[in-house]
């Protein structure tokens, strides 16, 4: 039985602080070896996930969603209405997904101030900066300052909306389609979409069009 | 709890590493840890909320300085010790000196593969009607659980507007204590000026996803 006691956990953390090896990779290796010995993991199952992370999981999944929303207005409408259902058309899954569309008037920015909530199934691992104190502390207090640090200019007349992921809802920003991409197919459009543009720390994708040509 | 993890609005953490290389994992151990957590045999009284709480309780210096996935190792280590499934000595050495009785076979590679990219859902139907509707003005409570909670300090005692209702979702404050209940969940939007003394009159906003028990009528 687990004793769900905060003080007890804090004491255990103090013990771990004093007894575990300092090097993160050694701590991880010891944990994995121990769990295998105890029969709590199968290394082949761990390998299967490691392979999946290198092959199937990453921001290109989010890019496919954005590209489809640019080329298919009906899909975009379904996405904005019920994103978790809509992305199944692309054989993707992410529970409780909320799509937020950038426009001339609005810029969306995603953060998780309390931990690291992120639409992992669509964007892969969150960047380290997304999980560290500098971004988490400032995104909700000085979002324009944060955007400036990423080199993003948002005019005074554009409203910035910050989404702090405090529950199990997962947010995906739909960046604006850049000019000069008329007639492009979905795959080519998807290649323009950056991970940061789907978090909201990149706004103008037109700089990607020239390099894609 | 008013822990070190509750970072929204705090000052002094310096610049963001905007030039970080855009790769999934920055060291091989990170991918191992992420994958271990996806496949580890979970105790029946563990939950995502209990895991988050165990990470929040990491010694504050470690929380701010040790790498992210290293903190996952530490949180799981604490959970294993707390549940009597491992000792600190075993976790330090990687060698088992005690056995855990009655465990099922660990997740197979085949099952692991079938779980990749599957959605997880946290909502469920409830008998109660939602108290609030879209466009209602609400005020967040000032007093929350001393344990796990998802109402950050910066958003307590603040006035905002309900912009969405999502049905009832697992309530983390209770789930972290192994009590599963579903409570109506809303998205509430706050003007930046309502949250921060220095914010000038602006149309910029911050929204949070908040359970009904965090909210009162304004």
Image: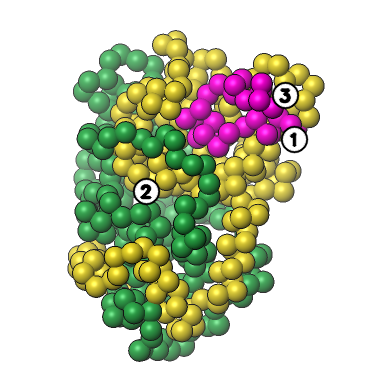
Residue B43 versus residue A127: which sits nearer the camera? A127
Give the image quarter of residue B80: bottom left
Question: What residue is shown with label 1?
Answer: A187
Query: Which class describes the residues within 10 Å of circle 2: few (<14), some (14-19), or many (20+)?
Result: many
Above or below, A113 against B137 in this view is: below
Chain A color in figure: yellow
Query: Which class describes the residues within 10 Å of circle 1: few (<14), some (14-19), or many (20+)?
Result: few
Magenta span contains residue B190: no
Name the side, left or right, on which A11 lies relative to B80: left
For disc 3, the chain is: A
Of badges 2 and 3, nearer the viewer stands 3
If you read the primary sequence from the N terminus, does the residue marked by circle 2 or circle 3 appear first?
2
Above or below, B119 against A203 in this view is: below
Disc 3 and disc 1 on one polypeptide chain: yes
Question: What residue is shown with label 2?
Answer: A115
If you read the primary sequence from the N terminus, does the residue marked by circle 2 or circle 1 appear first?
2
- Residue B33's spot in the image, x, y percent? 46, 64
- Residue A3's spot in the image, x, y percent? 29, 73
Q: Residue at x 38, y 26 (%)?
A: A149
Of badges 2 and 1, nearer the viewer stands 1
Q: Which mark is residue A213?
A: 3
If you read the primary sequence from the N terminus, does the residue marked by circle 3 or circle 1 appear first?
1
């Amino acid at each position: 039985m687990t004793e769900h006691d905060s003080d007890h956990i804090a004491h255990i953390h103090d013990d771990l602080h004093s007894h575990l090896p300092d090097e993160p990779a050694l701590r991880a290796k010891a944990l994995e070896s121990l769990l295998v010995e105890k029969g709590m993991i199968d290394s082949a199952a761990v390998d299967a996930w490691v392979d999946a992370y290198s092959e199937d999981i990453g921001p290109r999944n989010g890019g496919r969603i954005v590209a489809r929303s640019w080329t298919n207005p009906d899909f975009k409408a379904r996405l904005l209405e019920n994103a978790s259902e809509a992305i199944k058309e692309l054989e993707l899954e992410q529970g409780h997904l909320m799509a937020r569309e950038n426009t001339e008037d609005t810029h969306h920015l995603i953060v998780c101030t309390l931990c690291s909530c992120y639409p992992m199934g669509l964007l892969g691992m969150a960047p380290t900066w997304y999980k560290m104190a500098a971004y988490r502390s400032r995104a909700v207090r000085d979002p324009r300052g944060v955007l400036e640090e990423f080199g993003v200019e948002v005019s005074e007349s554009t409203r910035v909306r910050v989404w702090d992921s405090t529950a199990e809802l997962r947010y995906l920003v739909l960046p604006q389609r850049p000019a000069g991409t008329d007639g492009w197919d979905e795959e080519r459009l998807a290649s323009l979409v950056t991970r940061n543009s789907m978090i909201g720390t990149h706004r103008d994708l037109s700089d990607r069009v020239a390099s894609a040509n | 709890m008013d822990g070190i993890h509750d970072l929204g609005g705090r000052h002094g953490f310096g610049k963001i590493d905007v030039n970080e290389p855009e790769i999934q994992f920055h060291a091989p151990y990170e991918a191992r840890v992420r994958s271990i957590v996806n496949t580890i045999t979970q105790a029946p009284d563990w939950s995502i909320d209990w895991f988050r709480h165990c990470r929040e309780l990491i010694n504050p210096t470690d929380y701010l300085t040790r790498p992210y996935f290293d903190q996952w190792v530490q949180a799981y280590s604490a959970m294993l010790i707390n549940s009597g499934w491992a000792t600190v000595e075993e976790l330090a050495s990687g060698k088992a000196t005690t056995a855990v009785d009655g465990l099922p076979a660990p997740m197979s590679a085949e099952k692991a593969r079938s779980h990749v990219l599957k959605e997880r859902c946290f909502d469920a139907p409830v008998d109660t009607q939602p108290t609030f509707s879209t466009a209602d003005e609400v005020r967040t409570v000032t007093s929350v659980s001393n344990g796990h909670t998802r109402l950050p300090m910066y958003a307590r005692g603040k006035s905002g507007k309900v912009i969405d209702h999502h049905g009832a979702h697992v309530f983390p404050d209770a789930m972290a204590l192994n009590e599963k209940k579903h409570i109506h969940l809303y998205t509430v939007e706050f003007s930046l000026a309502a949250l921060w003394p220095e914010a000038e009159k602006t149309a910029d906003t911050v929204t949070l996803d908040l359970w009904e028990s965090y909210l009162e009528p304004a």
